[in-house]
Image (spheres, coloured by chain):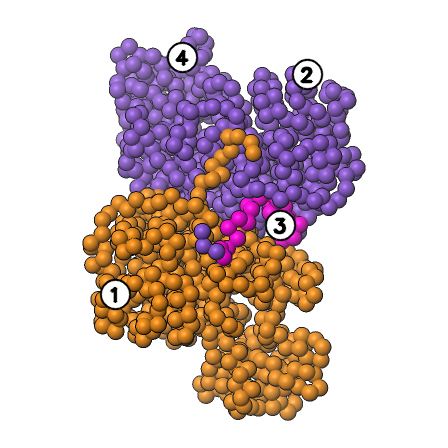
Chain colours: A purple, B orange
Amino acid sequence: MLEGLVQHDHALTVGMILRRMRTVTGNAQVATLRSPGQIDRASYREVAERADLLADALSKLGVGEGDRVGTFMWNNQEHLEAYYAIPAMGAVLHTLNLRLFPEQLVYIVNHAQDKVILVNDSVIPLLAPHTDKFETVEKYIVVGDGDASALPADKVIRYDELLASASPGFAYPEIDDRSASGLCYTSGTTGDPKGVLYSHRSTFLHAIASGMTDLLGVCGNDVVLPVVPMFHAQAWGLAYAAPLVGADLVMPDKFLQGEPLAKLIEGEKVTVAGAVPTLWMDLLRYADEHKPDLSSLRRVPCGGAAVPKSLMQAFEERYGVLIVQAWGMTETSPLGAVARPPRGLSEEEAWGYRTTAGRIAPGVEARIVDEVGEEVAWDGESTGEVEVRGPWIASAYYETDAPEKFHDGWLRTGDVAAITSNGFIRITDRAKDVIKSGGEWISSVDLENELMAHPAVREAAVIAKPDERFTERPLACIVFDEGKEVPAGELATFLLDRVAKWWIPDEYAVIDEVPKTSVGKFDKKVLRARLEDGELTDRHTVDKIEAAPAG
Amino acid sequence: MLEGLVQHDHALTVGMILRRMRTVTGNAQVATLRSPGQIDRASYREVAERADLLADALSKLGVGEGDRVGTFMWNNQEHLEAYYAIPAMGAVLHTLNLRLFPEQLVYIVNHAQDKVILVNDSVIPLLAPHTDKFETVEKYIVVGDGDASALPADKVIRYDELLASASPGFAYPEIDDRSASGLCYTSGTTGDPKGVLYSHRSTFLHAIASGMTDLLGVCGNDVVLPVVPMFHAQAWGLAYAAPLVGADLVMPDKFLQGEPLAKLIEGEKVTVAGAVPTLWMDLLRYADEHKPDLSSLRRVPCGGAAVPKSLMQAFEERYGVLIVQAWGMTETSPLGAVARPPRGLSEEEAWGYRTTAGRIAPGVEARIVDEVGEEVAWDGESTGEVEVRGPWIASAYYETDAPEKFHDGWLRTGDVAAITSNGFIRITDRAKDVIKSGGEWISSVDLENELMAHPAVREAAVIAKPDERFTERPLACIVFDEGKEVPAGELATFLLDRVAKWWIPDEYAVIDEVPKTSVGKFDKKVLRARLEDGELTDRHTVDKIEAAPAG
């Protein structure tokens, strides 16, 4: 190697962002909604000083390098403090999903061997019933002064008392940027949850990339509302990106309904907000009724599930809010693609891009692969499973073998897609949700999006039902807006100009709600099980598809 | 280290950007101005294929890993091909400054031990006279079909013939991202030039960071005109950032005057252009006379020297073009700071930030240090020498000791500045240009900026002149617009409301031109020498400073 290189070993660490919070971005702030109307504020400089105290206190509790510290918390200032203190001191921030099923929670805490868990008082009831099964947890640090009597008394410490007893000016160790900074388990739909272990390097790179105009474009003049939970893929990295660039953060804590979110956006003049589509549907319903001022919002990355075009159109037309679809998963840190359309297109052409999962992010490499492992051409038509790799993409799970997910440095995403010649990923299905009908594939995702564009349809999930002649046919499970049910034939007619005729489901099941996974995605596994068990009983067959009357 | 980390060893290489040019950004293009009105175009996909040919050809010429390959070229498509082929094949891209003095050029080529030099036919006259002193150069690859007879005939190869003889599909090696990708010498004002050796990691990180909204914000929808030469600090990284995000590049080759630049901006609808202030002054003069349509420009990072506020104001008021000041140097890759003002300020307050060198970039850490090495507070007033460190900042020169520039991982920039509490660097001087008057420091840079705001002043450079009473006093060397000379007293009066009264120079020297370094910076060393040699003879003393009449 030649001598005299630039600082090629300058470590890319969470501690670097923490140093920036004390200095360059120290005047920016985090605001936390504590109860309706009550907002606490702290500058990043204060957050950094409190992170020092937390690191000192954890260190005195015996937390050392590589130890896992769990958080079971909403999005709030204290969670932000944990986001910095724990990795910067060399320990591993293990964010626990508040919506896990009990057996998953127990599995994950024991698998990660969490030594300490920070828990918001408001979610103690979700955690406490299982503490007797946690094998490694020595302390529960309770954030908030609510009742903690359900936790083992000898293991409880109050966060504020802990910080009050700690010393300022913690001496952080030098960290190799290839060591672990964070851990997040994916609630896979099959088998045990699997841990994704982020490194300092991947976290820092992802934070820098989040500031790219083509990705989230978070900048020093933004006010960022991460509605997406900090326990889910590190809040899409927003809790690292915002302090890095000096954007303010607005934390909704447990108040994730349309009304408090709308009031936060209005009151704090939020410019960027990230959330899954279902939450934006809630917000839209609230907004349509109460007309809050959402004009400060300049960009809303939305992902975690396909974003219905109708939702994007509604926000844009009624509120001037630009929703930008983004794609990723826990394994991808999560930024994998963002759907900013190319310049110089007609509105219709631009929508053609905006309704894709997005353009492959700088730093991420992707390919599509067919069933025999051959690469598929990027012609925008041919489909295969999406595989990705890159400096913030997982190539293994934490202490769990999963050769079916990783090979030759590539992550198999489980998404089936076509890629356009300019790198936009058009997802047609989850590999396991594909409907194989008469030797051809039907995209359940496309059908769902088209069905959800019908004014009476609140949610639609399409699954395969066995069919003697075609092997499989689509069954559309529909949640109607209250009192708005329409006949099956009308839905079929509605689809006529929108999808290939042979795709159109000839049967519809009316359901009360689409079951969701712990991160809010449609859980079609549950629907398939209900179909098998004969529980989808409110079924309607299409008699006749009629073309819409001309004009 | 815990098992199962994300791809923490995924190499961040120039080759990664090259792969992206074949795929995601392959449809974007580079346009090169060949002669007035004649523009050649190639897609990035084509550039990547030609880079493969170049790599194959160089490899056959014996260029191996770590070998230095020089380029003596303007900004054009072939230079872009070299930017990718050379690092991706494991060799080192050594960009030679076309404006070097002969002895510097000879020193640099020999110090770097360039094995091959790619040279544009139009600059052969600058290179050929010295080839007999180059100790290691085996081949000259001539780009363009102009006369090459001045070069040693046995060493000349034509670029097009070379590519025609090469094979496609070059097999690039795996590259450790901490190995060298590029080399650029700084034309220091003292001693021999010194080489800055960029790594693949630093180059990739810098390219990602260039896409951040707070920095250059280059995105897939941009058309980027790097007026700043590719031989100067890697064209501020634009030649890597644009292909990474998929922005088009517009290359001016040797046509760097106001007219061709204005026509390129107008014709190619350029959205981002980077250049040093003097070139923008040329462009402004042309634009004021010919009124080209510059409305496509959305952001113009400008740096390399302090950007006069009057220049920024003129472009903004007359053409709606936002010039953004940026700060950096060859040693900083070069992005160190960008002056985007915080939100919510009055126009005047915003100008207070826009006229700084900028806010410290994410990824860069900075401090200011006084004469005894103590850190100075960030209060916006106290000054010290700026020191920086970070993953794209040099911590040594290529095979040259320079302990006076580097210590404890920090680079001493030679700039004297105050830093505001929110991380904006306000440069008051070059350490060596500081004027020490009566025990206090006078900022030559501030004086120059204020003087250049006077409508009759084209350029102003302020140097120290010895003074018995005050040790030093400022001497302002003024270039007037043709036929617009004004008396010294008027300049002094003009400064009265703008700087502290004791700063105001009591003597002015009228000169024809401010001498410039090879990268276009004011070369005050030359002015000081002229002063010493008694060559600054057109001197005017201020008789009386009069306050401007009220109202």
Residue appearing at x 66%, y 86% in the figure: B467
The front one of A77 and A288 is A77
Q: Whole-Å distance between the Cαs marked 4 and 3?
A: 58 Å
Element under label 2?
helix
Circle nearer the N terminus (3, 2): 3
- Give the x, y percent position of residue A379: 28, 37
Residue appearing at x 52%, y 25% in the figure: A399
Q: Is residue A189 left or right of residue A44?
A: left
Residue to which mark 2 is pinned: A132
The amino acid sitting under disc 1 is Lys
Does label 3 lie on the same chain as label 4?
Answer: yes
Q: Whole-Å distance between the Cαs marked 2 and 1?
A: 80 Å
The amino acid sitting under disc 2 is Asp
Q: Which mark is residue B155?
A: 1
Circle nearer the N terminus (4, 3): 3
- Vertical position of residue A273 compared to residue B200: above or below: above
Asked if the residue under mark 2 is in contact with the one under mark 4, i.e. CB atoms within 8 Å, the reply is no
- Vertical position of residue A343 compared to residue A439: above or below: below
Does label 2 lie on the same chain as label 3?
Answer: yes
Task: Evaluate whether residue B74 shows in this view.
Answer: no
Element under label 1?
helix
The crowding category of the residue bearing disc 4, from other C-alpha atoms within 10 Å (few below 14, some 14 to 19, many at least 20), is some
**Between tags 4 and 2, which lies in front?**
2
The crowding category of the residue bearing disc 1, from other C-alpha atoms within 10 Å (few below 14, some 14 to 19, many at least 20), is few
The amino acid sitting under disc 4 is Arg
Q: Which residues are magenta?
A: A4-25
Does label 3 lie on the same chain as label 1?
Answer: no
Q: Whole-Å distance between the Cαs marked 3 and 2?
A: 40 Å
Residue appearing at x 32%, y 71% in the figure: B131
Asked if the residue under mark 3 is in contact with the one under mark 4, i.e. CB atoms within 8 Å, the reply is no
Provide the chain ID for the residue under circle 2: A
Does label 1 lie on the same chain as label 2?
Answer: no
